[in-house]
Image (cartoon, rainbow, N blue to C red):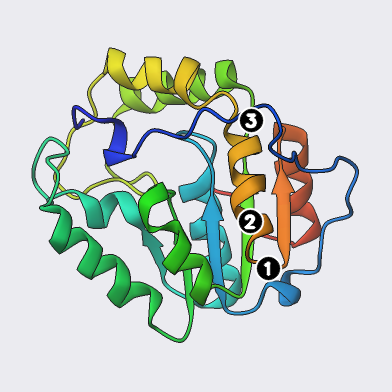
Amino acid sequence: MSSRPHGAAPFPTGDGNAPNFPSGVPILPLHSLGERIAILGPSNAGKSTLAVALSEKLGIPPVHLDQLHHLPGTDWRQRPEAEFAALHDAAIHKERWVIEGSYSRLIPQRLARATGVVVITSNHWRRSFRYLKRTLANQPGRAGHLQGAKDSLSWRMLKWILFETRNSDVIYAKVLQEFGLPTVQCHTAAALNNLYRTWDLPVRR
């Protein structure tokens, strides 16, 4: 795993005045999000799995930004920044896409092209458990896995999940206000499960 957790830039701390997502908002119909869907969320929230499910449902190949940001066949070694940015921009300029990943420095140009957004956040303890489970299982076939890479436990990643992305929902809410895109928000495991049921998405076993 890379020394910086999946190459993500640190989230701004926030000033306490950032708007939060409202609770109890009905889930929008899937078609209202259009054919360029950005999935945002902190590490191990379920973005990759959702991207695959949406891909199968819509017939649109998924794009996993972690795969673009790291070199295949390495232990999550990062590409040069300019190369990654070029791959990112090439992906978002296609007519149809489901792209998962945050990389906050590239979010503005991604949302400028997106037709809809899904935001997934969940309890940091739950995300830590997901990280430990997938790392120890080391399943090459899991959604978003880097070809030829081996998942290994990183205390830096655990720190990132437990402390540095705990308030990510506030940050995403603030960013999305600027774009006014149709947005679906899932901030608990129950909400994400409800999303799969509502949109009749295939569930990975």
Q: Is residue 26 visible?
A: yes
Q: Which residue is mark 3?
A: 122
For the point 18% across and 48% down, the residue is 70
State the CA–CA distance, disc 2 to disc 3: 18 Å
Choose between 111 and 79: the one closer to the eye: 111
Q: The residue under label 3 is which amino acid type?
A: Ser
For the point 73% across and 42% down, the residue is 193
Q: Secondary structure at mark 1?
A: loop
Determine crowd level at label 2: few under 14, some 14-19, many 20+ residues with C-alpha closer than 10 A. Answer: some
Q: Are marks 2 and 1 in contact (CB under 8 Å)?
A: yes
For the point 43% across and 68% down, the residue is 109
Of mark 3 and mark 1, the one earlier in the sequence is 3
Q: The residue under label 2 is which amino acid type?
A: Leu
State the CA–CA distance, disc 2 to disc 1: 7 Å
Picture coordinates of residue 65 (x, y %)? 34, 55
State the CA–CA distance, disc 3 to disc 1: 21 Å
Q: Secondary structure at mark 3?
A: loop
Of mark 2 and mark 3, the one earlier in the sequence is 3
Marking on residue 48: none
Of mark 2 and mark 1, the one earlier in the sequence is 2
- In the rendered image, the quadrant that contains the N terminus is top left
**Disc nearest the viewer among 3 and 1:** 1
Q: Which residue is mark 1?
A: 181
Choose between 165 and 34: the one closer to the eye: 165
Marking on residue 176: 2
